[in-house]
Image (cartoon, rainbow, N blue to C red):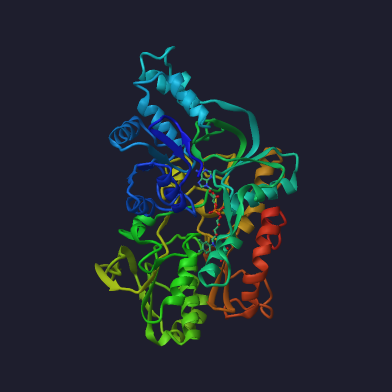
Amino acid sequence: MKVKALSPQLSVSPQLSLDDVRQAQEAGFKTLICNRPDGEGPDQTTFVEIQRLAEELGMQAHYQPIISGQMDDEHAAEFGRVLAEAETPVLAYCRTGTRSTNLWALSQAADFPADDLLRAAQQAGYNITSLRGRLLAANPNSNGTATAEQSAPDVEAQVWDVLIIGGGAGGIAAASSLLARDCSLKVAIVDPSENHYYQPGWTLVGGGVFQPETTQRRMKDVVPSRCRLIAEGVESFQPDEDKITLCNGQRLAYKALVVSPGLKLNWEGVEGLPETLGRNGVTSNYRYDLAPYTWKLVQETKGGTALFTQPPMPIKCAGAPQKAMYLSAHEWEQQGALKNIKVEFNNAGGVLFGVKDYVPALMEYIERYGIDLAFNSNLVAVDGPNKRATFEVTDGDGKVSRVEKPFDMLHVCPPQIAPDFIRVSPLAAESGWMDVDQYTLRSTKFENVWGLGDVISAPNAKTAAAVRKQAPVVAENVLRHVKNKTNVREALYRGYGSCPLTVERGKIVLAEFGYGGVLEPSFPRFIINGTRPSRVSWWLKERILPPIYWNAMLKGREWLARPVYEKE
Ligand code: FAD
């Protein structure tokens, strides 16, 4: 736990785990303040989980989530009020600790000289000089006079050829593809996460095939060696000035910007869900630390009702909610328990899978496992202790009614939205997703900005497989811009995405398709017929795709990912 003291009453830290909460209690902290909205990262412990444990240990916990780039004076005043009334010492946290530090400094500005606050933050390892103007303005006793200019944050001297936001599948693949084409480029990746995750592996963790650790690597070990890692969160974009602002207030300048921060898992979008995740039989393969709980529940469940849910589109890996269900049902079938378990798939949408060619094979498994299908049935609330889930069900006339269902096991795929700092940025479409041309992946609003991965507005399936095809396209088009090669044709992405549907342990229906649901198989039909369950596809998913991800896609080796070009 990286705790830094700002004052005798207050310390700050990056995101807490449940172990950290125990350590905080042992260290004597009485109150926790969470300044990070739930769902910002794929391994983020939700506030209610933190709060539950904190209260069990005799501490108080407050939730004051701040969206990056949206902190105003009222937020600071509220933080000051909570701090003044809290039992001390207090530990405040966000993703890195910077938001909490900023809130503290602003909340104390009327009482303490700006330089004292800046020095305390500096000693704790947080550079918040960008707040200097606001701190001076708030305190007439501070030396100097505040002007708007003084609040202008520092801009790092370096102008990056390419600045990449997010070190997930998209960010790392794009950086490697760029450097594979031109190793002289000055490229930086901005990402505050300590770890990088191979999320496609989580289905197999939930199915008892992979150990969770095999899906996680340290961020600094996957960032290409010729690329700088800036371990901070991005707060906001100033695309008219070719700059971004980090959560610590520092600004970075670029010639080209690549945006790939993934999406936000909106756990709070289902009432009662954050409170019960990881207990009461409620699980999800969509979080690193919860996927093992899925496998535990599958092994423990011998009878009763198992509900699997799918929220409205778009979501990442649209097949993942079903994959969890088929692997669970197959395990129960093997154990002889399936006859005692009622399995039900509650899907907010109206079809089993969006591309009709794959539906017949999936329906064979629905029948084999005796799964009940409930379409247009959207999970809206969970009562964990009483093991009841509430769905909004839309009938053929569009009438919506609420239906409550009991469960023994509930696997939830959470609603998914664009990250907060993207939704409020000038890069966003009305939908909140980053607005890009679906073929060139260039921003529709700013000519030196590109996007890839889950964050973009393009109507492809949000998958790592899509990223594998998108990264070379972005690399080609960014290079064309940075090197001013306007005579070179633009590379185009045709919407490829892939979804290996794990219909049983050992067999997969390998869905591969582009824009408009056009089938785009990677292999000849005699090797893999994607519309039929296949052992070769399982072997591909279990044995071949992970090394391809780590050793090819993340290293700029573009296997089966050659871009196409205009008029080709
Ligand atoms: P991510 O890989 O999520 O990375 C986003 C990065 O951005 C993170 O490192 C994060 O820390 C960083 N970031 C966020 N906010 C900020 C900020 N403010 N500043 C800086 N950095 C920030 N795909 C497949 O192809 N096949 C599958 O079988 C498959 N199965 C899946 C099963 C599950 C259960 C899940 C959850 C996903 C699955 N996927 C699958 C989908 C795939 O993992 C994603 O589509 C892919 O990871 C998207 O890559 P990305 O770079 O857009 O986002």
Q: Can you see residue 106?
A: yes
Ligand 1, by image quadrant, is: bottom right
Residue 366 x, y percent position in the rendering? 45, 81
Say which residue appears at 40% left-offset and 14% top-offset: 142
Left or right of 54 in this view: 436: right
Q: Can you see residue 440?
A: no
Say which residue appears at 36% left-offset and 50% top-offset: 54
Quarter of the image for the C terminus: give it: bottom right
Left or right of 184 in this view: 353: left
Q: Quadrant of residue 259?
A: top right
Q: Is residue 495 above or below residue 230?
A: below
Residue 358 x, y percent position in the rendering? 52, 76
Residue 423 x, y percent position in the rendering? 43, 45
Q: Quadrant of residue 278?
A: bottom left
Front-lying residue, 558 or 351: 558
Front-lying residue, 409 or 541: 409
Say which residue appears at 43% left-offset and 52% top-offset: 39
Say which residue appears at 56% left-offset and 44% top-offset: 191
